[in-house]
Image (spheres, rainbow, N blue to C red):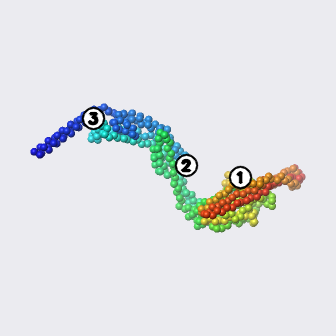
Amino acid sequence: MITNLKRRHLYIFATILIFITVLIIIPLSYIVEEIGNKIYPMTKIDNIDMGKKTKDEAIETLNKKYNYLDTAMVEVIYKEQPIATFSAKQIDLSRDIKTKVDQAYIVGRTPNFPSRIMQQINSLLGIRGMNFYTSIDYDQKPIKEFLDITESTYSKPAKNALFKFEEGRVTAFKAHENGVAIKSEEFSKDFASNIKNITSKNNIARVILKEKVIEPEITLAKSNSQGIEEFVAEGSSNYTHSIPTRIHNLQLAAGKFHGQIIPKGATFSFNQIVGDISSNTGYQPAYIIQNGKTVLGDGGGVCQVSTTMFRAAINAGLPIIERYAHAYRVSYYEQDLGPGFDATIYAPSVDLKFKNDTPSAILIQSEIDEVNNILTFKFYGKKDDRKVEISDSTVWDVAPPPEALYQDDPTLPSGEIKQVDFAAWGAKAKFTYKVYKGNDVIEETFFSSFRPWRAVYLKGTGGGV
């Protein structure tokens, strides 16, 4: 009895289920037939309703929405400067519209029967829709080619330091150089990420090309026992318009200082290192100031070297113990700085001296740029917390040169004129030198008093023409 009752209940349930299924499937088939080759309702792409649109209509709708991509650009920035630009055409920039339209079209048409029926019911009865999202698509080949070129252009290997100390001076020196490696993998990720930010209102994406520093195995600090580990400061001067013998002399004198070490706490003396300045040590005649006159003398041009050394010392913030200005303004020293940034020497009494109060020894390296006529001294050592302020020069009491002087010279043919001294305007000049070191401030004012200088000519009175 009970068994028959259960069978009757099952029969009734099955009959009802079949009846409901027929009620749903028969009208559903008519609706499916009506939809035909169109996308099912409640189906969206990028939140745009694509229901009852053909695939072509859906593609056209999305192409109109994203037509700004045709004029989009990607700008590459390296060290805050643009170095490359990719147009949409170059990288075939687009969105995967066709792929998403194909996926949307599959809704309600999947081969799996239960899934297909459920999708059709959800879609046609408005129970639950589906939303597909397009993504940016581009050709990565131009990006890889760009990175290959960039790596060969900007990447460089690290270089070890070289420091060879023999007989009291450095005979071989090369500061270490950090290498650089372009972060190509990070750039590719940033490119893919930033390109997604392109919109109709902002169709330019910017991607920063980054680099990483590669340290060498042997740094300057590891190459020596003097505590020298970095570049500290430099000073330069311009010797343009110098005569050949003057250039010879300044090059010879500058070489005396190349590789010299100033020990920590020691006082530097220019005269002590440069030594004898005469024809016996290879110097040639060039114009010097001697006994109130400009005359040809051995070593003319050495003061260009002392002036350059003085500039390096103040740029390094070192205490200047002894410095003398020239008797008159020398044009060479005002080609790059104002009056007063010079230092003359004349052994044994007139010297340039300064103290090395840095945390390590100081290595001097000289460089001569023969193309641009620039002499440079570079100091290597160890920096501390000092900061240097050097004011521009202040000039006053400017006075014109006296009237030219003509002197008879019987050794010259009659009527011949030869200039032996050159006019220069007189002036007073000063600049202020401040060194901030911890809580201490050291301030010094360097004064220069340049006399007006007359031109002197020799006038021939001798026989002959």
Query: Which one is in front in this view, the residue at disc 1 or the one at disc 3?
Result: 3
Any part of residue 242 in sight: no
Query: Which one is in front in this view, the residue at disc 2 or the one at disc 3?
Result: 3
Residue at x-position 43% and y-position 40%: 95
Q: Amino acid at mark 1?
A: Gln
Tag of residue 335: 1
Q: How dense is the environment of label 1, judged by Cα within 10 Å: few (below 14), some, or many (20 and up)?
A: few
Quadrant of the snapshot with the N terminus: top left
Q: Write down the residue under mark 2.
A: 80
Q: Amino acid at mark 2?
A: Glu
Residue at x-position 44% and y-position 40%: 94
Which comes before the other along the chain, label 1 or label 2? Answer: 2
Query: Which one is nearer the viewer's eye here, 253 or 346?
Result: 346
Q: Write down the residue under mark 3.
A: 28
Which comes before the other along the chain, label 1 or label 3? Answer: 3
Which element carries disc 3, helix, strand or loop? helix
Q: Quadrant of residue 237?
A: bottom right
Residue at x-position 51% and y-position 48%: 208
Any part of residue 33 in sight: yes
